[in-house]
Amino acid sequence: MDDFGQIALVSIMSHLVCIAVSWWALQAIRLDKLLKPNHVFQARLLYILLAIFIGSSVSNFFLDYLQWSRQLPLIFQ
């Protein structure tokens, strides 16, 4: 039962770190060339949504991989 708290903390931290890294990586893309002029708020919102989407996907991949690697020894029992 104590393990659920640790898993929740790792999951939250993983999502936040991956979202921050994806935000940082998205800064290298020049989306302003693709967007309409004078739509600053919409461009920022798009960056935020893309960072959340990419970061959550990457975090879920690593969390699934961690869970599967923890369950792998059960195959030998």
Image (cartoon, grey):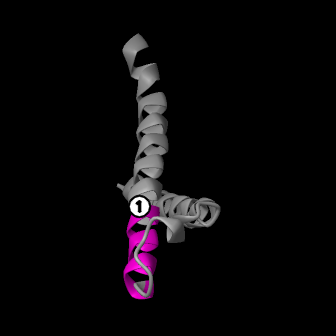
**Disc 1 marks which amino acid?**
Ala
Q: Tell me: 57 left or right of 19.
A: left
Q: Residue at point 59% right, 60% down? A: 29
Give the residues in magenta: 40-51
Residue 50, magenta (yes or no)? yes
Asked whether the viewer can see residue 77, the reply is no
Depth check: 38 or 12 in front? Answer: 38
Position of residue 2 measured from the top left corner of the image (x, y, whole percent) = 41, 58
Position of residue 45 measured from the top left corner of the image (x, y, whole percent) = 39, 78
Position of residue 38 measured from the top left corner of the image (x, y, whole percent) = 43, 88
Position of residue 53 measured from the top left corner of the image (x, y, whole percent) = 38, 58
Depth check: 63 or 70 in front? Answer: 63
Depth check: 77 or 49 in front? Answer: 49
Among the 4 quarters of the image, the one containing residue 1:
bottom left
Image: 58 above or below 67? below
Q: Residue at point 58% right, 64% down? A: 30
Main secondary structure along the magenta-highlighted residues: helix
Q: Which residue is mark 1?
A: 8
Q: Residue at point 38% right, 15% down? A: 75
Image: 77 above or below 2? above
